C-alpha cells in the first residue's frame, strides 16, 4: 500500500508540473464519473485543480444514471462514460465529442488469503464457477451484462441462478470482503477499490475490454479549462495513476 501511494504521488507531482506555470483565469468545471473510473478521477482531478486553479465539481454516479441525467438535459462539462455510451450521447446531441482515457477489463475477486480462482481457460473458469458456493455480479452494469452472457455461453445458467447475488449498484467486492459471497466478478478497477480481496483478471479468451472516454459537452462553460483538464488526464504522466488503479491508458 505504501508503494502504491508513493507511485501515485510521484505521478501527480509530474502532472502538476505541467500546469504549474502560466495559470489562466480560473473556471468552474462539472464532471460526472462512474464507479470504474472513480479511483483515477479521484486522484488526478484534484491534482489538476490544485495546479491549474480551476474548480472541478465531481459527481459520482452509475453510468446508467449519468446517461439518464444527460438525456434529461442536465448540464455538465465532462462526462466519463464507455465509448459506446458516449457515442450514443453524441448522436443524440448531448455531447459534442469524446477523448479516450483508459481501457478497463473484467476480473474475479476472492476474500484476501483465499486460494486464487482458476481462470486460466474457459473450461477452468466454468469449473471454478460451478465449485463456488456463492457468486456475485452487477445487475445491469456493463460487466454484469457481459458476465451474464458469458455464463450463458458456458452453459451453466441454471446451476448459477440459486447461488448468484445481483448487485444493482456499488462494488461487488464489498460482499466478497465481508465473506457474504465466495466469488465476485466486476471490472478490475472496481474490485481493486475494496480492501480485503485478491483480484485475478479473466484470461484473454474470456476478457471483455471497455474503453472509457471523456465526453465533452456541446457548450462547456469554459472550453479552454475543459481542454486543459482533458490534456491533463491524457498526459503520459497520468499513465502511472491509471495503471495502479487496474486500468490501462487508452
Image: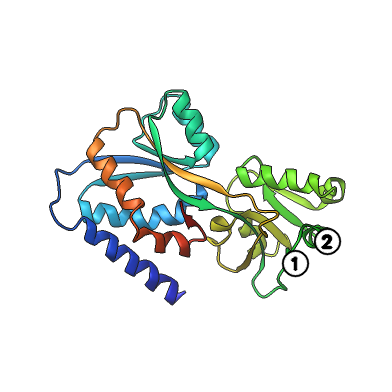
**Occupied quadrant, residue 124:** bottom right
* 36 to the left or right of 26: right
Determine the residue positioned at 40% across, 60% down.
Answer: 239
Check disc 1 and report its element: helix, strand or loop.
loop
Place of residue 81 in the rendered image (x, y in percent of width and height, measured from the top left): 48, 41
For the point 79% across and 46% down, the residue is 153
**Which residue has dot 2 on it?**
127
**Tag 1: Cα neighbours inside 10 Å, few (<14), some, or many (≥20)?**
some
Residue 57 sits in quarter: top left
Which residue lies under the disc numbered 1? Answer: 118
Up/down of 78 relative to 3, above or below: above
Q: Residue furthest front?
A: 205
Q: Earlier in the sequence, mark 1 or mark 2?
A: 1
**Rendering coords of residue 114 (x, y %):** 70, 73
Of residues 100 and 134, the one drawn nearer to the viewer in this rendering? 100
x, y percentage for residue 86?
47, 35
Q: CA distance from mark 1 to mark 2?
A: 8 Å
Amino acid at each position: 500500500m505504501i508503494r502504491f501511494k508513493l507511485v501515485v504521488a510521484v505521478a501527480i507531482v509530474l502532472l502538476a508540473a505541467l500546469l504549474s506555470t502560466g495559470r489562466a483565469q480560473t473556471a468552474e468545471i462539472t464532471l460526472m464519473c462512474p464507479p470504474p473510473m472513480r479511483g483515477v478521477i479521484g486522484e488526478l482531478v484534484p491534482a489538476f485543480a490544485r495546479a491549474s486553479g480551476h474548480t472541478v465539481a465531481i459527481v459520482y454516479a452509475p453510468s446508467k444514471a449519468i446517461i439518464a441525467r444527460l438525456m434529461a438535459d442536465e448540464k455538465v462539462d465532462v462526462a466519463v462514460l464507455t465509448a459506446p455510451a458516449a457515442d450514443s450521447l453524441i448522436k443524440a446531441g448531448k455531447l459534442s465529442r469524446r477523448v479516450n482515457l483508459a481501457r478497463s477489463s473484467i476480473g474475479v475477486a476472492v476474500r484476501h488469503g483465499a486460494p486464487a480462482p482458476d481462470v486460466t481457460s474457459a473450461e477452468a473458469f466454468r469449473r471454478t464457477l460451478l465449485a463456488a458456493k456463492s457468486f456475485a455480479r452487477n445487475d445491469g452494469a456493463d460487466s454484469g451484462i457481459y458476465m451474464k452472457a458469458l455464463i450463458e455461453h458456458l452453459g451453466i445458467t441454471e446451476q448459477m441462478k440459486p447461488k448468484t447475488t445481483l448487485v444493482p449498484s456499488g462494488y461487488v467486492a464489498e460482499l466478497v470482503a465481508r465473506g457474504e459471497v465466495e466469488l465476485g466478478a466486476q471490472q478490475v478497477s472496481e474490485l481493486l477499490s475494496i480492501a480485503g480481496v485478491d483480484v485475478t483478471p479473466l484470461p484473454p479468451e474470456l476478457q471483455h475490454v471497455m474503453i472509457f472516454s471523456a465526453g465533452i459537452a456541446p457548450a462547456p462553460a469554459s472550453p479552454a479549462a475543459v481542454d486543459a483538464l482533458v490534456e491533463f488526464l491524457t498526459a503520459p504522466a497520468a499513465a502511472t495513476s491509471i495503471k495502479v488503479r487496474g486500468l490501462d491508458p487508452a
